[in-house]
Image: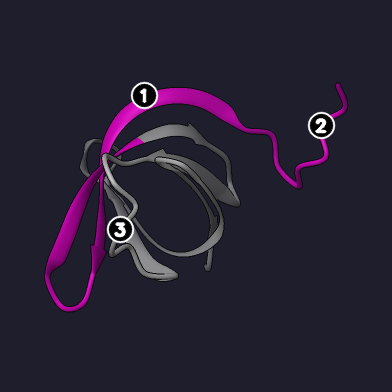
Amino acid sequence: MDENRIAPRRRLLKAGKISFGGGAAIDCTVRNLSETGAALEVISPVGIPERFTLVIEADHIQVPCRVVWRKGTRIGVHFET
């Protein structure tokens, strides 16, 4: 299988938060990460906006994101930095 991504991804399993709307936050699990984006897993995708800030406290990461795909409880995001 060929890899067509801009940046190589690395698999991981880290706790994160989807932050939006002046203080609202939804817990997520970061399943993979690259320089340009990430795949997130959530309990329910209901109410998650198209743009938000991904926070990974353990790595001191706080990056604005745009949703590029959704499939079930998984969300793919592109970093807007």
Tell me the kind of residue under disc 2.
Answer: Glu
N-terminal label among 3 and 1? 1
Q: Which residue is mark 3?
A: 46
Number of the label disc, if any, that sits on residue 33: none
> Going by the image, does 65 lie left or right of 22?
right
Dot in front, 3 or 1: 3
Q: In this picture, is 34 found above or below 14?
A: below
Total label count? 3
> Going by the image, does 46 lie left or right of 78?
left
Magenta span includes 41: no
Name the residue at 24% across, 62% down.
Answer: 19
Number of the label disc, if any, that sits on residue 3: 2
Name the residue at 17% across, 59% down.
Answer: 25
Tell me the kind of residue under disc 1.
Answer: Leu
Q: In this picture, is 74 found above or below 78?
A: above
* Residue sticking out furthest to the left: 23
Q: Position of residue 32 (x, y in %)?
A: 50, 32
Dot in front, 2 or 3: 3
Distance from Cα at disc 2 to Cα at disc 3:
30 Å
N-terminal label among 2 and 3? 2
Q: Position of residue 23 (x, y in %)?
A: 12, 71
> Going by the image, does 24 lie left or right of 11?
left
Distance from Cα at disc 1 to Cα at disc 2:
21 Å
Q: Which quarter of the picture shows residue 30?
A: top left
Tell me the kind of residue under disc 3.
Answer: Val
* Residue sticking out furthest to the bottom: 22
Name the residue at 46% across, 41% down.
Answer: 72
- The region drawn magenta spans 1-29
Q: Position of residue 63 (x, y in %)?
A: 39, 60
Say few, some or many: other residues with alpha carbon within 10 Å of mark 3 (under 14 / 14 to 19 / 20 or more): few
Number of the label disc, if any, that sits on residue 13: 1
Dot 1 falls on a residue whose secondary structure is strand
